[in-house]
Image: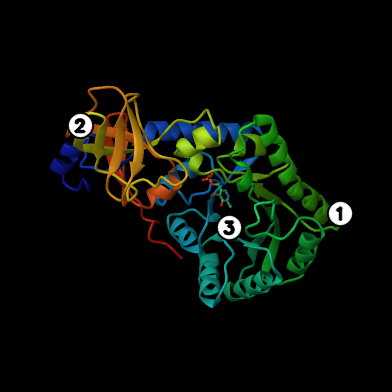
Amino acid sequence: MNATTSNDRQAANSLQRHDLDTPALILDLEVLDRNIAWLARFFRERGVAWRPHAKSYQCTRLAQRVVQGGAIGVTCAKLGEAEAFAAAGIHDLLITCPLVGPKKLERLAALRRVADPIAVVDHVDHVTALGEAGRVAGAPIRALIELNLGMNRCGVEPGEPALALARRLAATPGVTLSGLMGWEGHLLTIADPAEKTAKIRAALDGLVQTRDLLRSEGLPCPIVSAGGTGSFPISASTGQLTEIQAGGAVLMDLFYRNKCHIEPLEFALTLMATVTSRPTATRAVVDMGRKSLNPELHLPAIQGRDDLRVQWLSAEHGVLEVLAPPGPAIGERLELIPGYGDWSTLLHDRYHVFVGERFVETWPLDVRTRTS
Ligand SMILES: Cc1ncc(COP(=O)(O)O)c(C=O)c1O
C-alpha cells in the first residue's frame, strides 16, 4: 500500500495489522529498534565494530536504519546490493562474494567512484583483477583475504597460504590490503554451549594467527571480520575481531532462536495470514506457503497460539494442526513468525511497517531485484 493522498494517509494511519490483505510481511519498528539498540550496545561494550550483513534486509530503508543505529556500514553478499546501498548513502560496504569477470569489475570500478567498497579475495587472480579495477576507478580498492575457517566454501587456508596471498596483495597497485575475513557458518547449530564456544574460538584462531603472521612480516591487517547472528555472542567476545557481520539478528527468526540458541533478541519480522479452509476438526489451512515463508531451515510458527502448529507448507497453502479445539474460524487472521527470515524476505515486495498495532508506512524491498 502506498499512502499518497491525505485520505489515503488517514486510512493508512488507522490500519490495523489484522486489516491487511494477506499474506503480508510485517516489520515492527519498535521491536526492530530495540534489537538494533541492543546489538549496537553489545558490540560497543566489547570494543568491536558492527557491520551487519544486509543480505536478508533487501531494503535500503532497513539498512539505513541499522547505520543510524550504530553500524559502521553494511556487509553485502552481492555487488548489486552494494550498488543499491551506495545509492542510498551507505558508503562503507563489505562485499563477501568474490567478484569475477569483466562486467563485475567494471561495475566495481564505477562503485569505487561513489563509495568505498571492500572486496574479498582468496586467489591471486582476484588480486590481479581488483588491481585493474582500482586502476580503472582511479582509486585503490580495499580487499580482505577470505580465510577458510572450516566451512569449506570460499577462502584460502589460514597461515602460510594466506600470507603468500597477502604479500601479492600488498605488492599490487590499485588494491589495498585491508585485513582478513572469515565465516564460521558451519558451527552455528551446535547444541552444547561449551562445545559451540570451543569450536568457534578454535575456528576464529585461524584469523587470529594469520593476523599475527601478517603483522610479524610487517604487513597491515586493520580489519579482522567474522561472526553472524548464530555466533556473535561468542565471536564478539573473543576480543580478537575488529568487526562483526551479524545482520539477520535485527529481524530475528526461529532458526536463530531454536537452532542457534540466540536468546535476547525479539521477533521484529512476522507475516499476517488468513485462515482459508477448515477441512477437518484438527486441520486448518492458511493462505501462505513456501512462496511466502521459506521453511527449509525451520518451519514458521504461529504467534501467541499454543493451540496451533504449522505442519507443512505447499506453494500457496500452509497446513496447520489444531492441537486443541475449536481452532480458528475461516477468515481469522493469524500472525506467523518466520522460520528463516533471510530466505523469506526476498519473496515479498514490501514491509508493512507497524509500531505495535499502528501502521506507519511501507518500506519497499527495493534491493530484492539486485540479483547480480
Ligand atoms: C559471509 C557471511 N557472514 C555472515 C553471515 C551471517 O549473516 P546473518 O547474521 O544475517 O545470519 C553469513 C550468512 O549466511 C555469511 O554468508
Residue that carries the numbered disc 1 in the rendered image = 216
Please report whichever mark, 2 or 3, sits nearer to the chain's N-terminal start: 3
Tell me what residue is drawn at x 20 percent, y 42 percent.
21
Residue that carries the numbered disc 3 in the rendered image = 96
Query: Image quarter for residue 159?
Result: bottom right
Query: Mark 3 and mark 1: span between their CA atoms?
Result: 26 Å
Question: Callout 2 environment at 10 Å: few (<14), some (14 to 19), or many (20+)?
Answer: few
Q: Nearer the viewer, residue 336 or 179?
A: 336
Tell me what residue is drawn at x 49 percent, y 31 percent.
265
- Do we see residue 236 in this rendering? no
In this view, which residue lies farthest toward the right? Answer: 216
- Spot occupied by residue 250 in the image (x, y as percentages of width and height): 47, 38
In this image, 156 relative to 262: left or right? right
Question: Secondary structure under badge 1?
Answer: helix
Query: Image quarter for residue 369?
Result: bottom left
Please tell me whether mark 1 or mark 2 is closer to you in this view.
2
Check contact, mark 2 vs mark 3: CB within 8 A.
no
Question: Callout 1 environment at 10 Å: few (<14), some (14 to 19), or many (20+)?
Answer: few
Q: How is the image coloured?
A: rainbow
Amino acid residing under circle 2: Glu
Please report whichever mark, 1 or 2, sits nearer to the chain's N-terminal start: 1
- Spot occupied by residue 274 in the image (x, y as percentages of width and height): 22, 37
Residue that carries the numbered disc 2 in the rendered image = 332
- Do we see residue 112 in this rendering? yes
* Residue 157, placed above or below residue 187: below
Q: Is mark 3 within 8 Å of ligand 1?
A: yes
Amino acid residing under circle 3: Thr
Question: Secondary structure under badge 2?
Answer: loop
Question: Secondary structure under badge 3?
Answer: loop
In this image, 8 relative to 59: left or right? left
Amino acid residing under circle 1: Ser
* Residue 46, placed above or below residue 123: above
